[in-house]
Amino acid sequence: MKTTKQKLPICYILFSGGLDSRLALKLMQDQSPGKFKMIALTFKFPFGSGCCQPDCSFKFTQIQGVEHKIIDCTQGKLFTEYLSIVKQPKFGHGSGINPCIDCRIFILNKTKELMKKNSRDFIVTGEVLNERPMSQHRKAMITIDKETKLEGKVLRPLSAKVLEETISEKKGLIDRAKLFDISGRSRKPQIELAKKYNITYPHPAGGCLLCEKVFAERLDDFFERKPMSKIEPKDVQLLRIGRHFLFDKYKIIVGRNHEENILLKNLRDKKEKLFEFKGATGPTVMLQGKIDEESIKQAKDNVLRFSKNKDEIVEL
């Protein structure tokens, strides 16, 4: 009688590229080889969130010999779905407009869609208990797993020994003895582990823009001005650059350097107006919203305000 070979379960590693996710990947490589296949998933968001660029994440996973996939949430259906979560999260915002718990639920749900064909698949994250105030305390982790119906399916190897045992551990796929009991905001245990594995890692810089007060205010105002159905990826790109001046029925964006001036020109659509000096160096200014004598004057005033030049100002 012919027997069919059982497919190996897949370990999906949520991989931002930062220190914690790199260590989570290395800890999975320390487990018994041949028990499961590893795939690293990097979610690319319109507001950032990873600790390095996707190409950096890809390079690390390739060096480690691990398959790497990027889930692009900066355009199309995933962009719209994610933006709706940012605007109105079920579990609220953090210090800015960051929906950390809902964001985690979104990521896990999208990962779960890849797991449907094999009930033995499981998810690994680099989360550390009590490292982040909103989404990485015990109650939040329980809530996230419950909302996604992934109880027992999410392994957090850096903190596993201070959390409930997962299904993959109970079934012998994962050796719990090789996992850790890290908790708290100190990064010293992770830095020591990085030395042990001889791996480099990017230092945290920037992170998620949704946590930044100025950007959060811009985005909150933007949600008030434009219907969700009409928001495009380029709108988010514009929020990330320049100085923004908000008026009741229009907005002015001032480029801060040559690169931002170029971006304003490239991202402009037919409803927006651009102004700059005719023959001298200075800022490019974009006018959005109501176009009338008052708003045009304000736009031109901002060209003058942020330049020492007094050349003729022209509309592009």
Image: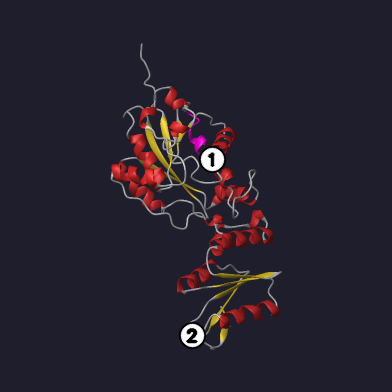
Q: Residues within 10 Å of mark 1 (few under 14, many from 20)?
A: some
Please say whether residue 226 is visible from this viewpoint: yes
Residue 292, quarter of picture: bottom right
Q: Which amino acid does the dot numbered 1 rest on?
A: His
- Secondary structure under tag 1 reads loop
Q: Nearer the viewer, residue 67 or 176?
A: 176
Kindly identify which residue carries mark 1: 137
Residue 40, quarter of picture: top left
Q: Position of residue 219 (x, y in %)?
A: 61, 59
Q: Position of residue 121 (x, y in %)?
A: 45, 29
Q: Position of residue 127 (x, y in %)?
A: 46, 41
Mark drawn on residue 176:
none
Which quarter of the image is occupied by the N terminus? top left
Q: Tell me, yes or no, whether the highlighted magenta stretch contains residue 112.
A: yes
Query: Residue furthest toward the top?
Result: 1
Q: Which amino acid does the dot numbered 2 rest on?
A: Ala
| Disc 1 + disc 2, Cβ < 8 Å | no
Q: CA distance from mark 1 to mark 2?
A: 55 Å
Q: Which region is colored magenta?
A: 111-117
Q: Tell me, yes or no, whether the highlighted magenta stretch contains residue 92.
A: no
Which quarter of the image is occupied by the C terminus? bottom right
- Secondary structure under tag 2 reads loop
Kindly identify which residue carries mark 2: 280
Q: Nearer the viewer, residue 264 or 221?
A: 221
Please say whether residue 289 is visible from this viewpoint: no
Q: Which residue is painted at 37% across and 29% down in the image?
A: 36
Q: Residues within 10 Å of mark 2 (few under 14, many from 20)?
A: some
Q: Earlier in the sequence, mark 1 or mark 2?
A: 1
